[in-house]
């Protein structure tokens, strides 16, 4: 053979070159797509899909300009006057607020807190036309139970940050491997890093539907849910609407009132007995609810423009709904309080989060939020109630569910299998009393696996 015999024609050489280019381009596309896909450890039994159902990794990265603007606003804060003996009776205590603002301006480090939050596996996915943010922290135990954790207002993902580790890796915290959970912590529309709704109607029923879709998209066909505050009512709706896939429902306290039989669904619900689990002094503690249920946009201008105004509005509830002797910082550190406030500030969600009160009231036309969109509704899913005595307010009306009457009321609405009154704790129990909360959640779901 001679070399001349094996020379290729110019056209065939060009075709081979073009084929090679196409092959490498395809390989590069495949590698890029693979790099953008969340790892199996992060996303669990699901896989990312194309289009609007894609699950995309997310990291919190607040622009430096936002933080500089915040510091400038804090340095120019103008405070009102206050009676010397007012304490917290008229609302947020002025000396405490001034002290916290000084710390916020001069010592608080958002970047440190941002780094800690980014240690969690975070994602976004489009549901119902909105980009929904959620933490999805999977256990290394493949037999772990999926657990949906729902918070309310004025809380955030921060409420569950202390329990993610013990839930996903209990052995590392002195627990048992069989108590492992895959944890899903979403932010409601209009809250935190989720999109703000651009239309009316994102009420608790609609939000519950989003969480049902989220758990299905993650591939979970048998899961549990826990809720506090709005999360309690929304978790109840998830249990009503997705009972076939629910292993159990755990709530930070279970309210109850006699359910109306289906045949009498148009009749008014009989009022609850006044002395049973009477948790809120309406004359002193529901003013915020009336404003947010009627004119959230009016309030929202201040929440959006003033970090001090936002902090004051949120702090008053954390003070009033937590279990302490008058010193809030015996329960929460300043960094913890401010990180929750910061999530509202850097996302500008003071107004959009407040609208859930308006949407809930206008969903049924009632004056107070209710977890039951149907008068005859009753949860068939096994339910555990872990009530904390200072869950709502601290005006001498501590929640007492350690009575037969309280459990009887709850059983009209829920399939109660566990009913616990904690010795201490308030409205944000997973953050305030994580050990008590963990013990109750683990004990309840141990029999649901």
Image (spheres, helix red, strand yellow):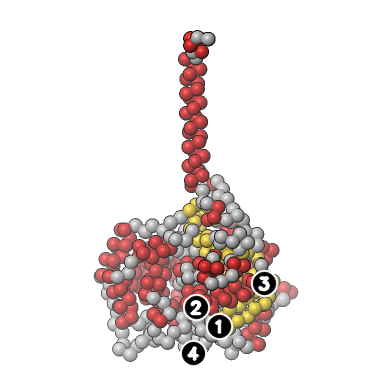
Q: How far separated are the C-alphas under marks 4 and 2?
A: 20 Å
Is the C-beta separation of discs 4 and 1 under 8 Å?
no
**Would you identify the image quadrant in which residue 401 lies?**
bottom right
- Determine which of the numbered discs, if any, sits on residue 436 in the image: none
In the rendered view, tell whether residue 439 sits above or below residue 277: above
Q: Position of residue 268 (x, y in %)?
A: 65, 79
The answer to whether mark 1 and mark 2 are in CB contact below 8 A is yes
**Could you tell me residue 55's position as x and y percent?**
53, 52
Mark toward the start of the polypeptide (4 vs 2): 4
Q: Which residue is mark 3?
A: 447
Residue 79 visible to an observer of this rendering? yes
| Element on which disc 2 rests | loop
Q: Which mark is residue 396?
A: 4
Disc nearer the start of the sequence (1/2): 1
Question: Does label 4 or label 1 sit earlier along the sequence?
Answer: 4
**Chain-order first, disc 3 or disc 4:** 4
């Amino acid at each position: 053979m001679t070399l001349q015999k094996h020379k290729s024609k110019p056209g065939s050489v060009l075709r081979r070159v073009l084929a090679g280019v196409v092959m490498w381009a395809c390989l590069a596309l495949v590698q890029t797509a693979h790099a953008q896909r969340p790892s199996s450890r992060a996303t669990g039994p699901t896989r990312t899909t194309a289009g609007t159902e894609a699950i995309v990794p997310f990291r919190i990265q607040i622009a430096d300009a936002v933080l500089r603007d915040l510091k400038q606003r804090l340095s120019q804060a103008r405070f009102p006057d206050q009676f010397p003996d007012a304490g917290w009776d008229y609302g947020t205590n002025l000396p405490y607020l001034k002290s916290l603002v000084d710390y916020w301006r001069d010592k608080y480090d958002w970047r440190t807190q941002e780094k800690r939050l980014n240690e969690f596996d975070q994602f976004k996915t489009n549901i119902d036309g909105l980009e929904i943010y959620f933490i999805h922290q999977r256990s290394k135990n493949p037999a772990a139970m999926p657990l949906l954790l729902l918070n309310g207002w004025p809380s955030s993902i921060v409420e569950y940050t202390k329990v993610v580790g013990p839930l996903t890796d209990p052995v590392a915290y002195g627990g048992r491997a069989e108590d492992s959970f895959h944890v899903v912590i979403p932010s409601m529309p209009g809250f935190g890093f989720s999109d703000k709704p651009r239309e009316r109607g994102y009420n608790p029923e609609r939000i519950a539907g989003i969480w049902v879709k989220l758990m299905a998209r993650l591939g979970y066909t048998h899961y549990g849910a826990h809720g506090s505050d709005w999360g309690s009512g929304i978790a109840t709706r998830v249990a009503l609407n997705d009972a076939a896939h629910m292993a159990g429902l755990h709530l930070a306290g279970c309210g109850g009132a006699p359910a109306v039989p289906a045949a009498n669904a148009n009749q008014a619900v009989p009022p609850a007995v006044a002395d049973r689990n009477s948790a809120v002094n309406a004359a002193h503690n529901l003013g915020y609810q009336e404003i947010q249920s009627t004119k959230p946009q009016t309030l929202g201008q201040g929440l959006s423009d003033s970090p001090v105004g936002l902090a004051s509005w949120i702090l008053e509830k954390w003070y009033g709904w937590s279990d302490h002797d008058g010193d809030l910082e015996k329960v929460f550190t300043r960094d913890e309080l401010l990180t929750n406030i910061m999530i509202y500030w850097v996302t500008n969600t003071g107004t959009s989060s407040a609208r859930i009160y308006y949407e809930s009231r206008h969903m049924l036309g009632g004056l107070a939020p209710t977890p039951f969109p149907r008068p005859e509704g009753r949860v068939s899913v096994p339910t555990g109630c872990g009530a904390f005595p200072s869950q709502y307010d601290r005006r001498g009306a501590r929640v007492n569910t350690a009575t037969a009457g309280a459990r009887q009321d709850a059983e009209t609405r829920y399939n109660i299998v566990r009913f616990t009154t904690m010795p201490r704790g308030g409205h944000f129990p997973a953050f305030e009393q994580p050990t008590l909360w963990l013990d109750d959640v683990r004990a309840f779901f141990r029999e649901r696996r």
